[in-house]
Image (tube, rainbow, N blue to C red):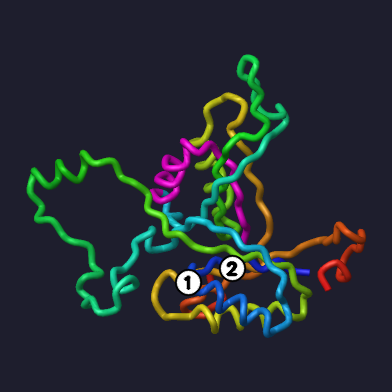
């Protein structure tokens, strides 16, 4: 058994759920999380409005004068976070690649912030209602 | 790769994130959680708090960076009083970037 943790865009959640349902894996847990990646939580304006020119994505550069230096260093730095959805599902070993591929194909937009998928091992699973363990519990 | 899940005080979250960013680990996911530990919550006079708010910081790093990240988190979130939190480390077999589809962190 493997656990797949996928952190994806909020607006891709219905499509992802649909794609997983079509594969035959309707069972998953969804959680609202805040996250940041290599871009440190910077959201490109093009994500919100596709008509904006590319140059709007770069942060404004202040002319280096003593006043701007003082301004920048007087402000407390705040860590930025982007709201995301985290999906967690436990699946049998042989279907991991298939599910990962389908999540990637649905969520791929080519822009930063598409998310990450982690695959980690799970030792055992138990269904509470029937006390079934192992593969039967997630079947 | 290893997944690090750290349950820290919510007020220490920004400090920890800034320190991690400074050390070159900007990527993480956080979520607010409620929980209790060995002390079964908190007793303040007649009031008993069974579940206390914590921030769960989750990040996946390469094997070699685990010690550094954990030490940094412990340094920054320690106050010396009960309720500083716990850090759990678990294995991750593969990580995929959705944008590129590559199996890389």
Q: Secondary structure at mark 1?
A: helix
User: Residue A129: where, in percent of width, then height?
Assistant: 88, 59
**Parent chain of label 1:** A
Residue at image location 86% in from the left, 70% down from the top: A135
Which quadrant holds the N terminus of chain A? Answer: bottom right
Image location of residue A7, percent across then percent down: 55, 66
Closest to the camera, between mark 2 and mark 1, is: 1
Q: Which residue sits at x=58%, y=77%?
A: A16
Q: Earlier in the sequence, mark 2 or mark 1?
A: 2
Residue picked out by circle 1: A11
Which residue is rendered at x = 31% and y = 68% of the image? A44
**In the rendered image, residues at marks 2 and 1 fall on the same chain:** yes
* Position of B49 relative to A35 (above/below): above
| Neighbours of disc 1 within 10 Å: few (<14), some (14-19), many (20+) | few
Q: Which residue occupies the extreme top position in the image? A: B45
Does dot 2 land on a helix, a strand or a loop?
A: strand
Pinpoint residue B16: horizontal percent, then vertical percent.
Answer: 46, 42
Residue A19 at x, y = what percent?
62, 82
The answer to whether residue A34 is above or below residue B101 is: above
Q: Where does label 2 land, which residue?
A: A6
Count of picture labels? 2
Quadrant showing the C terminus of chain A = bottom right
Q: CA distance from mark 2 to mark 1?
A: 14 Å
In this view, the residue in front, B94 or A17, is: A17
Is A65 part of what is drawn in magenta? no
Query: Residue at position x 16%, y 43% from top?
Result: A71
Q: Is residue B19 covered in magenta?
A: yes
Q: Nearer the viewer, residue A99 or B91?
A: A99
Look at the image and give the residue range highlighted in magenta.
Answer: B1-22
| Residue A112 placement, left or right of A46 | right
């Amino acid at each position: 058994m493997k656990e797949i943790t996928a952190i994806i865009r909020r607006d891709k959640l219905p499509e992802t759920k649909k794609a997983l349902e079509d594969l035959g894996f309707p069972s998953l847990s969804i959680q609202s999380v805040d996250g940041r990646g290599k871009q440190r939580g910077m959201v490109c304006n093009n994500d919100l409005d596709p008509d904006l020119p590319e140059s709007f994505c770069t942060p404004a550069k202040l002319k280096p004068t003593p006043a701007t230096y003082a301004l920048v260093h007087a402000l407390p730095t705040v860590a930025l976070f982007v709201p995301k959805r985290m999906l967690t599902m436990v699946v049998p070993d042989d279907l991991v690649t298939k599910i990962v591929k389908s999540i990637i194909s649905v969520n791929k937009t080519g822009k930063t912030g598409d998310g990450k998928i982690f695959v980690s091992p799970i030792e055992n699973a138990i269904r509470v209602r029937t006390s079934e363990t192992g593969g039967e519990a997630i079947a | 790769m290893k997944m690090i899940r750290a349950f820290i005080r919510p007020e220490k979250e920004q400090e920890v994130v800034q320190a991690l960013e400074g050390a070159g680990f900007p990527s993480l996911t956080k979520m607010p959680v409620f929980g209790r530990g060995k002390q079964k919550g908190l007793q303040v006079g007649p009031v008993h708090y069974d579940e206390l708010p914590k921030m769960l910081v989750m990040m996946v790093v390469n094997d070699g960076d685990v010690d550094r990240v954990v030490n940094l988190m412990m340094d920054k979130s320690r106050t010396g009083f009960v309720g500083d939190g716990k850090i759990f480390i678990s294995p991750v077999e593969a990580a995929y970037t959705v944008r590129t589809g590559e199996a890389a962190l």
